[in-house]
Amino acid sequence: MTVYREGRVATLAFGGGDVSEHLAVRTQAPGGRTQGTTVQIWIDPKYFETVDLPLHDLRHLLRSKVALLPGVSVTLTIEKTGEVTTWLYQGGLRDYLMQTLNADPLIPLFEGDQYASASETENYAEGEGAAWCVAFTEDGSPVRESYVNLIPTVAGGTHEAGLKDGLFGAIKSFIDMHGLLPKGVKLMLFFRHLPKLVERGVVHVAKPPLFRVDAPTRGKKPAAKFHALDDGELNAILDKLRKEGCREGAWTITRFKGLGEMSAEQLWETTLSPDTRCLLPVTYGSIDRIATTDALTKLMGKGEAAARRELMELHGDAIEVDV
């Protein structure tokens, strides 16, 4: 092993489990290499079943080291074949991940880092922290890698589990908001941050019923429960009950105010079950993406109160308000 640093060159060699050449330090000749490390390896068949290195694993390990040390270059030279490979990732984890993925991310990469400062050393050492980069793709095999002090942690660990819990817990909380997030805001989230999902037609809105009708026994027909999406379906259900001989007013009509009022069983039966649910596809419709962006900005954007007032004045009479 040869180390170049501060105008000096240090060499050290090991063999047979011991030091074969003791540490030697000399002054670097003018014009010579000023920094870096060179490592040469010869496999001893006394300790290994084969003298052939697992080159695929070695390349992967070296690439990951470079990604964890942005700006540092690593060169692998295979003297037997003359093959030379150099890796350098100025963008660190981002560049490494983007070159590893087999498909384009559906949304912008989620990346960041956080390290303890000198004022935060009560529970952490100064400089201790983490960096992360996460991508979501529709195709391709999953890529999951984590490291601690440049050492691969293929079995995961608390550091990886903590990132997963924080990542998916925060997104779930952001989207769910305890069930209070309006549908328009959720659709805005998909439009702004998951546009490819909308373009591919995989986003749907589950439409819950507005009414539930509990009908009594009608001749040979047993008591039954019906759901109606709107007034039209409700009237059709009542007309059917009258034709079946159900006495006027013998049924009970329940109006749902929202999904929050439903029990888990009702929610599954009316809105989630693939056998009974009503799904509405989300598309751009007859206007293009630019026009859609403009409309959503007026409806949802900050500082757009005047635009929203104008829209209501122009099109307010076209909407049936359910009070």
Image (cartoon, rainbow, N blue to C red):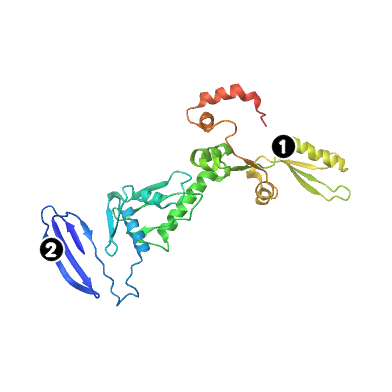
Element assignment for label 1? loop
Q: Is residue 96 visible?
A: yes
Of the pair 36 and 132, the residue shown nearer to us:
36
Find the distance from the CA under tag 1 to the CA under tag 2. Answer: 86 Å
| Residue 6 position in % (x across, y down) | 15, 55
Looking at the image, residue 284 lies above or below residue 77: above
Q: Which residue is depicted at the point 60% across and 21% down?
A: 314
The quadrant holding residue 279 is top right
Determine crowd level at label 2: few under 14, some 14-19, many 20+ residues with C-alpha closer than 10 A.
some
Earlier sequence position, callout 1 versus callout 2: 2
Image point (51%, 26%), residue name: 305
Give, as a three-letter code, the residue at label 2. Val
* Whether residue 56 is situated above or below residue 215 in the rendered picture: below
Left or right: where 21 falls relative to 62? left
Q: Tally the numbered discs.
A: 2
Q: Residue 102, percent across and down?
A: 45, 51
Hey, which quadrant is residue 315 in on the image?
top right
Image quarter of the N terminus: bottom left
Residue type pointed to by label 1 = Asp
| Residue 219 position within the rendered picture, expressed as x and y whole percent measured from the top left | 89, 48
Question: Mark 2 highlights which residue?
Answer: 25
Q: Is residue 128 visible?
A: no
Query: Quadrant where the C terminus lies?
Result: top right
The image shows residue 211 at horizontal and vertical percentages of: 72, 40
Front residue of 177 and 150: 150
Secondary structure of residue under mark 2: strand
Q: Which residue is mark 1?
A: 230
Q: Left of 261 or right of it: where is 88?
A: left
